[in-house]
Structures are given as structure tokens and as C-alpha cells.
Image (tube, rainbow, N blue to C red):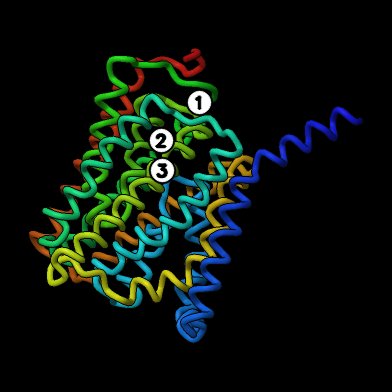
Amino acid sequence: MGALAEQTGRGARRFWPFLLWLAAFYISWLLIVSLNGLWPVVRDHWPIAAAMAAGSYFAGSTPMGGGTVGFPVLVLLFDLPATLGRNFGLAVQSIGMVSASIYILTARRTLDWALLRPALLGALIGTPLGAAFIAPYASDLLVKLVFAVTWASFGIIHWLKLNEIVKPEGPRHPHDRLDTPIGLAVGLTGGVVASLTGIGIDMMIYTVLVLFYRADLKMAIPTSVLLMAFTSLVGISSNALLGQVNPALYAIDPAVFRNWLAAAPVVALGAPLGAVVVNYLPRKPTLLIVSTLCLGQFIWTLFKEGVTGWLLLLVLTALGLLCAGFLWLFRAGASNGEPGSTR
């Protein structure tokens, strides 16, 4: 009995960095709100806080950043600019996804470091470059459509291959010659996508892991969370620095801070909660719900933006090509065999 109590105590002590992070965040948030008289701002922006209660849970339990909910709520429901939705996504994930990442690390969850390390490097390069040279020149409609197509393809591939995605267990087969270039490519391209929409890089590393490498979801999802947390920090920091250099081109809308102020205390706990619960709930229902939401926002975007004619054809073509790419990735991964080898 004494040995069990000692082991339990050691396990609890392992989480002190996570508890310290939460204490530091909530004390800082309370000071910012109280000393600056911002309680009315928090109260007035309760709808985004309510939306992010669900968004943060999905952020911690699936390969979807909190911006996947925040972006359509702000941009499609509240008719705010896509740039605001993107920056809000990056800002709120810098709390929620970071909080989930600290929990994941302290809980010693298994991560695919062979793919994650080069992806982090790629994101460090691709995200600022995308923020500086691509995002400012992309129209609101283009950003909305990139977001819609990216996540619709995620939903479709899960509806098509869900049984195969949830099946693998244990460590994946290593590919020493492929891991670094693939991880770097995911980081570079995903960083650019994140600089446009505020999300996407998490979905990219996740799909590579589960489709090509046939990785266990218990490893793929935490890996995607850490990459999105890092990319969010790089992205919002890049946008803030660029805003100081050229406010006319890169300035962050003050509404980002107001919405962040209301949502941040929710996601700081919601995302880690998702990371905890994902180990105890069946994965199929959660992924099916998420996939349906992804398809729903795609249809919503097309109707709301009045996408018809040649533009609709281009959007559907892009969606088809992305899905075809995922299916090719899945077939290419068949040569990897079943997971279970040791690293």
C-alpha cells in the first residue's frame, strides 16, 4: 500500500510544470483584466468564449486547432475579416494548444519526434515567410476558401478511411531516409498554410502519420498538437513584429485582443481536458463529429460567399485533388506494413 501511495505521489509531482503554467496564466489574465477595467470587454465577448469551449476540447483531442472553430465563428457567423479570424486562431491557440502541449509533455505521452523535429524547423521558416510575403496579399475570399477546402478534405478522407485510421496500435515503422525530408516539407508548407488561415499544419502532420506511416492515433494526435502550438506562437509573434515594422500592411485588428481576452481562460483548460479525455473515449464518434463539422463549414462557406460558376468548379477541383493526394498517400503507406516495430 505504501509503495502504491509513493508511486501515486511521484506521478502527481510530475504535473507540477503544468499546474505552474496554469497558475501563471490565470494570475496574469486576472491582472490584465482587473487593472485595466476590462471586465465589460470579457462579458461582451462571451459568444466566442462559449464557442471556444467546444473548440478547445476538439483542439486537445483531435488534430484540429482551436482556430478551426474560432475562424468560422468569427468570419462566417459574425462577418468579421478573415485576417481577424486567422490572427485570433493563432493567438488563442498560443494559449490553448500550448496548455495542452505542456500537459502532454508532463504526462509523457508518446510523440513522433523523428517527424516532429524537422517539422518544427520547417514551421519556424515557413510561417514567418508566409506571414510576410503571402498572407497580406491574399484576399479574404481566398483565405476562406483555403480554410474550407483544407478541412473539407480532412472530413472526406476520414469518412472514407476511418476504420483503417483508428486501427493501428503501437509504434510505427521508422523511415530514416524519409522522416527528415517529409517532416521538413510538412513544416514548410504547413507553416505557409497556417500563416494564411491560422491552422492546417496540425492536420498535415497528422494525415502524414496516419495515412502514410499508419501511426497510432495515440501518437499522431499529441504530435499534431505540439506542432500546432509551436506554429501558433511563431505565427502570432511574426504578425506582431511585422505589425510594428509596417502597420499599414500587417497591423493586427484590436478586436483580436478583445476576443482573445474572453476565450483565453476557457481554452487554457479546455484543450488539456481534450488531451486527457481522448485516452478514455472511443475515437470513431469524435472523429466522425469533427469530420461532419468540416464538411458542414465547407458547404456553409460556399453558400455564404455565393461561390458559383467557374470559381465553384475551381474549388471543387482543388478539393478533389487534395482528396486524391490523401488517397495516394494512403496507398503509398500500404508498403510500410503494419505498425508495431520498435524505434
Q: Is residue 336 above or below residue 143?
A: above
Residue at x 34% of width, y 77% of height: 78
Q: How many marks?
A: 3
Q: In terms of secondary structure, where does tag 2 sit? A: helix
Label 1 vs 2, first from the N-terminus? 2
Q: What amino acid does circle 2 point to? A: Lys
**Residue 88 % position (x, y):** 35, 65
* N-term mark: 3 or 1: 3
Residue 343 at x, y = what percent?
47, 15
Q: Quick one: 178 or 147, which is closer to the camera?
A: 178
Which residue does the image show at 82% across and 32% down from the upper left? 6
Label 1 to label 2: alpha-carbon separation: 12 Å
Q: Is residue 303 visible?
A: no
Compared with 324, 168 (above or below) is above
Residue 320 location in percent, x, y? 21, 44
Based on the displayed image, in which of its 4 quarters is residue 14 positioned? top right
> Dots 3 and 1: beta carbons under 8 Å?
no
Please tell me which residue is depicted at 27% across the width and 51% down the height of the picture: 194
Label disc, if present, on residue 161 of the rendered structure = 2
